[in-house]
Amino acid sequence: MEIKEFYDYMKEISKIQNAAALVAWDMRTKIPSKGARDRADVMGKLSRMTFEMETSSKMAEFVEYFNRSKVKDSLNEIDKRNVYLATKQYRRGKAIPPEKFEKFMIACARGETVWQEAKAESNFQKFKPVLEEIIGYLKDFTDMFSYEENRYDALLDEFEPSTTTKDIQKVIDGLKKDLIPFIKKLSNTKRPDDTALKGKFDRSLQERLSLEALKVMNYDFKAGRLDETEHPFTIGIGPGDVRVTTKYDPSDLRPSLFGTMHEGGHALYEQGISEKYFRMPIGTGASMGIHESQSRTWENMIGRSKAFWKFFYQKLTDIFPQYGKISVEDFYKAINVVEPSLVRIEADEVTYNLHIIIRFEIEEALINDRVKVSDLPDIWNAKMREYFGIEPSNDAEGVLQDVHWAGGQLGYFPSYMLGNLYAAQFFATAQKEIPDLEEQISSGDLKPFRKWQKEKIHRYGALYDPKDLIVKVTGEPLTHKYFMDYITKKFSEIYEF
Ligand SMILES: [Zn+2]
């Protein structure tokens, strides 16, 4: 058997995935409301087709043949990795009986609907039965996937390959020790005034600003576009087509601007993957955490930096002249207010990771039967008190705030935290390797940094596991140290202590 046969087959899968991505993009941006119901069936059909091809008897032949040790040894690094990823997908797909998986998918679809109602009514009891059902399936699946130490490892593996519960626990232990006292210190210091950021912001002008930001980032508009949506996302539709979406809040331009930079960071990653990897299993990001690190870099480490606003403030005041009255220094402080808050997606870059730690601790205990679904509201509130010193007044702004559990996505949250930590570690390396990075950012020349990201991270796609990639780029395994150094330096200056 020739490796070309395997690649031809993978190309066919990739084409169906591209069609599914286009349908998904349409469903979340442009589709007329009456068309949505039927289109869900189209989506279902395309997902089933992909799944069937990934677990077909043809794929079984490839997996069997290319994993024979003699054949495997004759493959180059790229072929080996592609076979490895396809094999992993095959085995995961085969581990669960299709009928059981279908029931799980139906429970998740119902879960999301019930969750929406339960959240609107702030009624956890309503969500409890379907969540119990979903968690039940996930427990069964983890046992079918097999894991070495902790059930939670099997869940993590889908989002953060080769990263274990133990790895995450270790990072969290270090982070907690340094981060919690730092947040306390910030809370006891006078916070910058951000009232000037509120106002009335025309939708089309916000769009102009978002486009301006993407241009500065060197986002390739010939290989993508920007559209409006309810819950912003980035999606790769295929080679040469990576689309960004954002949301416009008429009274605050932060969500659209920083949201666009966040999604733009994801898009640069996808646009930067080597063309040689198109339609191969490695033609995607290394993991959710690495992906998130790229978005966080642009949103926070660049987008909320002093250097960036040295040149970008002029562009902002050109479009929104009302900002002419506020100094760039005050503006910079205002976009960097730190405040313990109840809602994860509204959290600042300092307190954000605490929200993830809470979710990780709950998920890990839940999947290992150390807590019950019915205990979740109490546990949630207790952890909010412990970590933030505040408590939600109802479950809608507490345990019911995120959609992830309703969609069966346990194991996803840690990627957000890892993303913040990877971002800081990568950025520290970039600062070492590009000595005048700061001046370049201040003058609006982001090309050298974009080139650095592409060369060091993006072009490899999923050729390496995240654990190996971080060592390859930065010379050491993931540590929370760089994140702490970054926020300590930045925020002790802003908060003047
Ligand atoms: Zn993201």
Image (tube, rainbow, N blue to C red):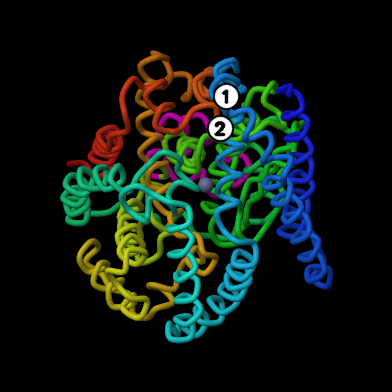
Residue 450 spot, x, y in % from top left: 55, 23
| Left or right: 142 as drawn, with respect to 242 | left
Q: Residue at x 45, y 43 (%)?
A: 160
* Residue at numbered disc 2: 84
Vertical relation: 2 (above or below) 157: above
Span colored in magenta: 303-330
Identify which amino acid the numbered label 2 is placed on. Answer: Tyr
Cα separation, mark 1 vs mark 2, equals 6 Å
Percent across and percent down for residue 443 are 51, 22
The residue sitting at 30% across, 60% down in the picture is 361
Magenta stretch, overall SS: helix
Vertical arrangement, residue 253 with respect to residue 460, above or below: below
Relative to 40, is 451 on the left or the right? Answer: left
In the drawing, does residue 214 fall left or right of residue 487?
Answer: right
Q: Residues within 10 Å of mark 1 (few under 14, many from 20)?
A: some
In the image, residue 364 sits, relative to residue 170, either above or below, namely: below
Residue 80: give its label.
1
- Give the numbered dot on residue 135: none
x 20%, y 43%: residue:
174
Q: Does the magenta run of residues contain 198?
A: no
Q: Disc 1 vs disc 2: Cβ atoms closer than 8 Å?
A: yes
Residue 320 shown left or right of residue 303 in the figure? right
Which three-letter amino acid code belongs to the residue tagged 1?
Answer: Lys
Q: In this orientation, does residue 109 appear? A: yes
Tell me how many marks there are: 2
